[in-house]
Image (cartoon, helix red, strand yellow):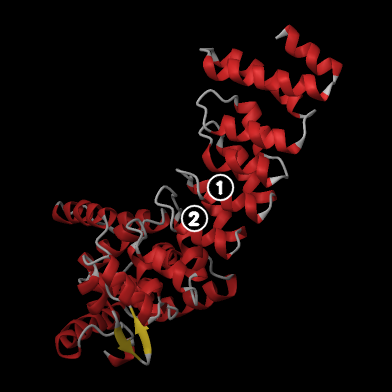
């Protein structure tokens, strides 16, 4: 370490290059504690500031594959403005912390973002930035990455960005972790070509896509999403609560307030009762009256109804003015009339097919 420090102090480019490769080889070949690895990182990092970009890129490539790469040094290299230096670390290094990835995703070039999108594992906090800030190529790359995880908000951004982008829509449709209600929206907006590709690539959901797409007032609507593990887990858990008599308004509020879409939809379908795909569609449609009718028919209070409205709203946001309007409308609804709507809808469902839930209390 003393010799390496002297190489830095002398500042001779040739001696720095020799020293950096010597230190790197020692690091990779040896067995060290994290404290010792950190010391290597400090020394190599100082040397790296004195060498040319080509040599730094070679260093990054070498360290990207090492399980002993110093955290402090990988962060330094990943933050380099030159993609030749940062790229290998951002794409391959397992010694890069989430904080550095997020910082790079927020501030660096699209080339940097593309490298991050190709990592073996990309956490939600990072993909949340990529799907908003990333260019088309970045978004397509991370959507096709099976090791990437997405939050509900991240998936929502992806669905919206997939409009008119068949490559992105296809990648999203092939993901088994996409929430059912967002798969609904995806298929509803997807082209026929994309739906056909999904049927070929995913024979297990082919028949569901056929059943899913129905013509309602000239617009394609979705009925069923892929049978994800999360959905069936939610269905079993909520069904057990219902069997024990524990599926209360408080539970529905808890599900909706926690943004648990699957649990909320299953709970409402059991309490109404209505088919779960009808409830799912009611929750996400632009027309919010079906949600108000469902909630009033169960004699729910306004806070619970508000949680249901926010759950299905774009980005989980509703303007104050719109919320006031919905509250006024909700207060004017009659419980008995809304229950009549549900009964009327169920009685007509068999003869009319699975139509969207648009009945008015006045029609009951």
Determine whether the residue tagged by mark 2 lies in a helix, strand or loop: helix
Is residue 313 in view from this perspective?
no
> Would residue 171 appear left or right of 73 to someone viewing this image?
left
Give the mark count. Answer: 2
Where's residue 77, x and y in %?
67, 35
Of the pair 178 and 255, the residue shown nearer to us:
178
Of the pair 311 and 296, the residue shown nearer to us:
311
The C terminus lies in quadrant? bottom left
Write the residue at 19% across / 53% down.
Answer: 236
Neighbour class for label 2 at 10 Å: few (<14), some, many (≥20)? many
Where's residue 183, x and y in %?
36, 68
Q: Which residue is mark 2?
A: 142
User: Does 122 appear above or below 342?
Assistant: above
Q: Do the residues bearing badges 2 and 1 touch, measured as CB atoms within 8 Å?
A: yes
Q: Residue 116 bears which disc, if any?
A: 1
In this view, the residue farthest toward the top is 2
């Amino acid at each position: 370490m003393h010799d390496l420090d002297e190489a830095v102090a002398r500042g001779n480019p040739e001696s720095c290059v020799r020293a950096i490769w010597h230190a790197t080889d020692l690091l990779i070949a040896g067995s060290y504690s994290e404290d010792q690895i950190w010391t290597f990182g400090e020394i190599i990092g100082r040397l790296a500031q004195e060498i040319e970009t080509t040599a730094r890129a070679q260093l990054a490539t070498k360290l990207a594959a090492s399980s002993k790469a110093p955290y402090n040094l990988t962060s330094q290299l990943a933050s380099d403005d030159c993609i030749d230096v940062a790229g290998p670390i951002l794409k391959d290094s397992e010694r890069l912390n989430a904080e550095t990835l997020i910082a790079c995703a927020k501030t660096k070039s699209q080339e940097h973002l593309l490298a991050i999108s190709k990592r073996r594992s990309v956490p939600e906090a990072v993909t949340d930035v990529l799907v908003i800030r990333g260019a088309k190529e970045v978004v397509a790359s991370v959507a096709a990455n099976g090791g990437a995880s997405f939050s509900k908000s991240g998936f929502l951004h992806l669905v919206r960005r997939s409009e008119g982008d068949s490559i992105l829509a296809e990648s999203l449709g092939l993901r088994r972790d996409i929430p059912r209600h967002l798969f609904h929206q995806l298929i509803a907006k997807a082209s026929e070509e994309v739906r056909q590709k999904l049927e070929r690539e995913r024979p297990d959901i082919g028949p569901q896509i056929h059943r899913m797409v129905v013509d309602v007032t000239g617009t394609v609507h979705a009925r069923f999403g892929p049978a994800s593990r999360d959905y069936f887990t939610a269905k079993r858990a909520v069904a057990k609560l219902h069997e024990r008599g524990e599926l209360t308004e408080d539970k529905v509020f808890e599900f909706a307030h926690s943004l648990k879409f699957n649990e909320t939809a299953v709970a409402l379908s059991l309490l109404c009762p209505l088919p779960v795909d009808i409830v799912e569609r009611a929750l996400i449609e632009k027309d919010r009256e079906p949600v108000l009718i469902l909630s009033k028919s169960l004699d729910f209070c306004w806070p619970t109804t508000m949680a249901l409205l926010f759950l299905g709203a774009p980005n989980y946001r509703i303007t104050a003015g719109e919320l006031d309007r919905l509250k006024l409308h909700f207060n004017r609804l009659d419980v008995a009339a809304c229950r009549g709507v549900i009964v009327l809808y169920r009685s007509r469902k068999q003869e009319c097919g699975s139509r969207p839930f648009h009945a008015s209390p006045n029609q009951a």
